[in-house]
Amino acid sequence: MRNEILKNPALPRGFSLSARIYLRPVGITPATIAAPDARLLAGGPLAFTSLEIAVRDAGVVQRATASIADVLCWAGEEGRLEETEAQLVRITSSRGGIAGMDFSKPLVMGILNVTPDSFHDGGLDANAKAAISRGQGLREAGAHIVDIGGESTRPGAAPVPDQEELARVLPVVEGLSDHVTVSIDSRRAGVLSQCLQKGAVIANDVHALTGEGSLEAVATAKVPVILMHGPADPTVMQSDTDYADVVLDTWDWLEERIRLCELAGIPGQKILVDPGIGFSKTAAQSARVLGDISLFHSLGCAVVLGASRKSFIAGVSRGEASEDRLAGSITAVNYALSQGVQVMRVHDVAETVQAISVWQSFQRNGVAGQDN
């Protein structure tokens, strides 16, 4: 049953002790020109001055926006100061970086699908030699990470046997990992384990390590992991889009996955979160999750955006095919940059690197003013 959403100018009052509180940083600007009372966003180059509060209680979500000081005062009056301060610490604390790279600037993760049936580039790099060459090209174009996948997770895609997936990706991992920072995109423990032993240094799982043995495989490998919100199998995921509140439900699900990963021995600083644009979500739901993506900073992890070429772009536009969604993909990246997202997972590396460079120049000009 969907939650009723109430937007009020005043901060919520009179909610129950069981109500959940969510904080989303808003009023985000470059830290160098932010107001004196602004707080750093995830310890990075941006800062925020205000918070949107969402209080979920008995099927009703109340939302309001206020300054950080007013939110803390409100939380004290409502007896919720400790949890509010804890979320604020998670929003502001520095992220630990990934594979030797820090988050002082956005990182680009280039997509390398070694598959015959991926939604955008299926079959282009379906043999090891072509895939290795493509991966080297992504690195030369500016990718900080190359994400190798051997199973399509497009809506309706049929599962691939473990050994077939491994046969697709392992030669590519081995062929690239000496010169490229490689992540392995898989939901299977055996594939993750083998690739992490052969040179991949990041695990990226569309099911957030819910598969049998996956959690243990990554904990044993002691590598960073990207937990994506993808609760349903690709064969049925686009019929599994019923949420009380898509943004808050996604946040809750990822929070629980983080908790279980930490219990299994994966340190929080090695966990990144991806809210799963296009996975078990309609186009409108994906657009809403992207619009509220700064909420996910309150999980205390670096945030990954994977919106590249996805069908939600067509769904909110004019039904364009994947090859005609570059502009929408870059627009999504630009918005995510403005919200402090740390990692962009994309097909179009050179174009994304250019977009980031231009965005960064605007940020610098906003600080320094016009050229003399």
Image (cartoon, rainbow, N blue to C red):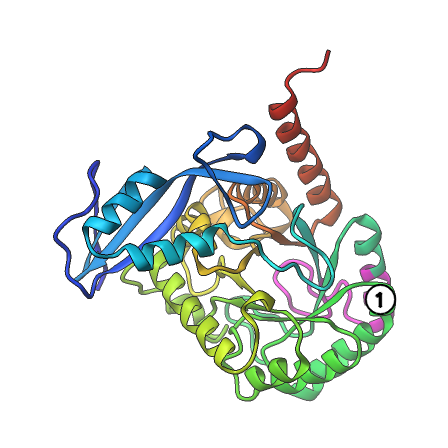
Q: Is residue 350 visible?
A: yes
Residue range corresponding to the magenta coloring: 112-135
Between 342 and 335, the one lying in front of the other is 342
Q: Front-most of 323 and 360?
A: 360
The residue drawn where x is 73% and y is 71% is 201
Q: Residue furthest top?
A: 372
Circle 1 sits on which residue? Answer: 132
Does residue 249 appear left or right of residue 133 in this picture? left
**Is residue 185 shown above or below 324?**
below
On the image, the x and y values in percent for residue 312 come to: 48, 52
Q: In the rendered view, would you say 199 is above or below 371? A: below
Q: Residues within 10 Å of mark 1 (few under 14, many from 20)?
A: many
Q: Is residue 253 magenta?
A: no
In the rendered image, which quarter contains the C terminus?
A: top right
Residue 269 x, y percent position in the rendering? 58, 65
On the image, which quarter does residue 272 sit in?
Answer: bottom right
Q: Could you say whether the residue bearing mark 1 is in a helix, strand or loop? A: helix
Q: What kind of residue is marked 1?
A: Ile
Total numbered labels: 1
Give whichever of 324, 142 is nearer the camera. Answer: 142
